Amino acid sequence: MVAAGLVAACVAAGAAAPAGAASAYWGANIGPHLTGASPPYDMTAADQFESMAGKRMSLMEFSLPWAYCNTDPCSFIPFPTAQMEAIRQRGSIPVFGWASYSQPLTMVEPDFTLAKIAGGAYDDYIRQWADDARDWGHPFFLQFDWEMNINGLWPYSESVNGNNPGDYVKTWRHVHDIFREEGATNATWTWCATGEYNGSLGLKALYPGDDYVDWTCIDAYNWDYDFKPFSSVFGPTYDAVQAIAPSKPLLVGETASTEKNGNKARWISDALTTQIPRRFPNIKGVVWFEKYEDRDWPIETSPASKDAFAAGIASPFYAGATFSDVTSPIPPLTPVVTTGATESGSSQPGGQTGGGRTPSTTSGARRCVARRSKVTGRRVLVCAKQSVIQALATKSQIRSGFSLPVAVPAANAAIRITVSRSTSVLLRFARRSGRRYVAVPGAVKLPLQRGQQGVLFAGRLSTKRTLTPGRYRLSVTAVSSTGTRSQTARSTFTLLK
């Protein structure tokens, strides 16, 4: 990894956030110890936690399995629309863990092997869940089958339950493809590993590829049997994840410290005020594990720890609850610092290069890599130009009308495009036919100004061509002044009557 000084230089070379601007989302996974029930099912517990923290959360985490199998037949769990909306109404973004197993949980669940899921055994359930997520229509972090690199804890681990190497990636891609087909683009796909340890499964072979991941994520804790600073708890796994997916923002999916065998208050203060803001530039969100499970993880286990958390999270670095409406995929609040990612493709398992869809979280920072000069022998930074298309978002449903595509302010527009410089883009459409998308002849060329702009669109490509209602994939390609086409970003939507 690049040394801290080089990372700082790379940030300075790009578009650094203004002083005092929020740089990271924050929130908690809150247990039932406060009121007897957990948020989002009991928001009084969220109120109590925020009162202790002294700040409103921008993230709220909870999770569910696919099914309850303590009765026959199993009862499959639908998309939690009411709970998602309750979180959104507070100005927070849901962080939802979705686990492809049943409860009661065991390591051997032959009905829920990765091969069966990837082979289509649960496509009807997945498709309905994706449809319900799409119909709710608001962005959320989706942590699908998290901590997959733990050797044997979850039945979706490749080391148990009859699973085999390669099954995890196949399953992730299969589920993701169904979401894409159904137009559930409000899910921000979050690949969440546990902190690496002696015996954990290798991360590189478990990574689905940049085209299938929007954010990376790490769950890691400071245990009493090995009390050590945040930098040591997260550093090695952070480095490994950054090497695999350097263009992606990173979420701390869960973290906490015990009080035993060390100074928890000092650990919290160091993590929130020094390590995350200064040493780990691509941590763009933090979730505290506010539960008594195995250890004394909550912030209120001592007055000193609670005060340290409140003092750290009070920093303007951590965003408050102002996110009832965000774009999708959920963008980081400050640019991602990349170290050696390519402009047109991205790392995939097996050495393949991803094409087509632009990485969802392209930043305004230049892509920089540290290299050793052949002349002086010193390490220098080499920075490439930033991506032209930084974000693309479409409404999940667009109603047919009579207007032709035209650039408009972004607010409430059917299509929102963020570009790093003034440019022209080509809009091309493909209509879903069965399981394939068939290209619609013709394209629309639009000039866009730097920043985020909207596109007014109601199904007409020209005075002679109008799209019929149905499912569509939009492809947006940047075009230079000389006509050279560079990157392409894609999104899907349903055109209504």
Image (cartoon, grey):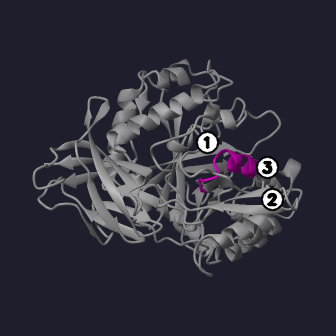
Q: Nearer the viewer, mark 2 or mark 1?
A: 1
Would you place residue 48 above or below residue 19 in this image?
above
Q: Is residue 239 magenta?
A: yes
Dot 2: element: helix
Of callouts 3 and 1, the N-terminal one: 3
Q: Residues within 10 Å of mark 1 (few under 14, many from 20)?
A: many
Q: Residues within 10 Å of mark 3 (few under 14, many from 20)?
A: some
Check the image and report above or below for 336 versus 465.
Answer: below
Q: Disc 1 on helix, strand or loop?
A: loop
The three-letter code of the residue at mark 1 reads Ser
> Which span is picked out in magenta?
236-249
Residue at mark 3: 236
Looking at the image, which residue is at 58% across and 54% down? Answer: 32
Q: Is residue 34 left or right of residue 185?
A: right
Give the mark toward the camera: 3 or 1: 1
**Mark 3 residue type:** Pro
* SS at circle 3: helix
Separation of marks 2 and 1 at Cα, in angstroms: 26 Å
According to the picture, the residue beneath numbered tag 1 turns out to be 347
Is residue 250 visible to the viewer in this orientation of the structure? yes
Q: Is residue 494 magenta?
A: no
How far apart are the two marked residues, 3 and 2, measured between alpha carbons?
Answer: 9 Å
- x, y percent for residue 454: 31, 66
Q: Position of residue 245 (x, y in %)?
A: 63, 47
Q: Are marks 3 and 2 in contact (CB under 8 Å)?
A: no
Amino acid marked by disc 2? Ser
Residue annotated with mark 2 = 231
